[in-house]
Image (spheres, helix red, strand yellow):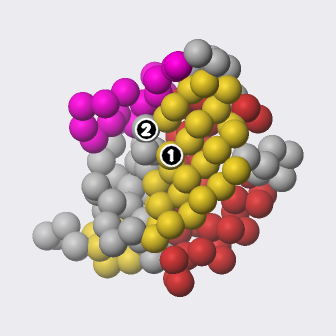
Amino acid sequence: MKAPEPVGLYPHARRVGNLLFLSGVGPRKRGSKDIPGVKMDATGNILSYDIEAQCRSVFENVRLILEDAGSSWDKLVDVTVFLTDMQRDFATYNRIYADYFKDNQPCRTTVQVTALPTAIAIELKCIATI
C-alpha cells in the first residue's frame, strides 16, 4: 500500500460486488504525520495551511488507494468532500477539482464540517467501480 496509514481501525477500501467504497481519505503522506501545506506551533495548533497543497495531496492519495485496490481514477462514480472552511477554501478546491476531474465527472457532494480527525482541512469519501 502506498497511501498513508489510516488514523484508526479501518481499511482504506472495501469491495462489494463491482463497487469499491473508500474510507475517508486525507492529505497526509505515508510514513509521516506531517500534513502537506500545514504549519503548526510547538503545541500542535494550526498556524496556517495551504488548501491547494492539501487538495493535490488528497487527490493523489485517492488515486493510490484506487489503484492498489484494482480500480482507477476514471472509475470514480461518487465523491463526497468535507471542508473545514467552505467560505475560505471552496473556490480554490473547486478550481483544482475541475483540473483533476475534467475527463471523469462523478457525482459530487461538498459539505462543511467543524473538524476532521487530524489537523487537515479536506477529506474525501469516494465510491468507484472495479
Q: In this view, does 51 lie above or below 129?
A: below
In the picture, measured across the screen, residue 25 lies left or right of residue 20, that is left
Type of amino acid at the residue the image marks with label 2: Ser
User: How far from the left and from the top, in percent, is residue 121?
Assistant: 43, 65
Residue 40 visible in rendering: yes
User: How far from the left and from the top, in percent, is residue 9?
Assistant: 24, 31
Total numbered labels placed on residues in the image: 2
Type of amino acid at the residue the image marks with label 1: Lys
Q: Is residue 1 above or below residue 23?
A: above
Instruction: Report the residue marked by disc 1.
Output: 125
Q: Magenta stretch mostly in which secondary structure?
A: loop
Please name the residue shown 67% across and 26% down the image: 129
Q: How far apart are marks 1 and 2 (CA)?
A: 6 Å
Residue 5 located within the stretch drawn in magenta: yes
- Tag 1 near tag 2, CB within 8 Å: yes
Residue 30: quadrant of the picture? top left
Instruction: Report the residue marked by disc 2.
Output: 23
Q: Is residue 130 above or below residue 109?
A: above
- Mark 1 Cα-neighbour bin, 10 Å: few <14, some 14–19, many ≥20: some
- Mark 2 Cα-neighbour bin, 10 Å: few <14, some 14–19, many ≥20: some
Considering depth in this image, is 39 or 95 the residue closer to the camera?
A: 95
User: How far from the left and from the top, in percent, is residue 63?
Assistant: 62, 36
Which stretch is magenta?
Answer: 1-16
Q: Is residue 85 above or below residue 100?
A: below
Please name the residue shown 86% across and 46% down the image: 103
Q: What element carries label 2?
A: loop
In the picture, measured across the screen, residue 28 lies left or right of residue 46, that is right
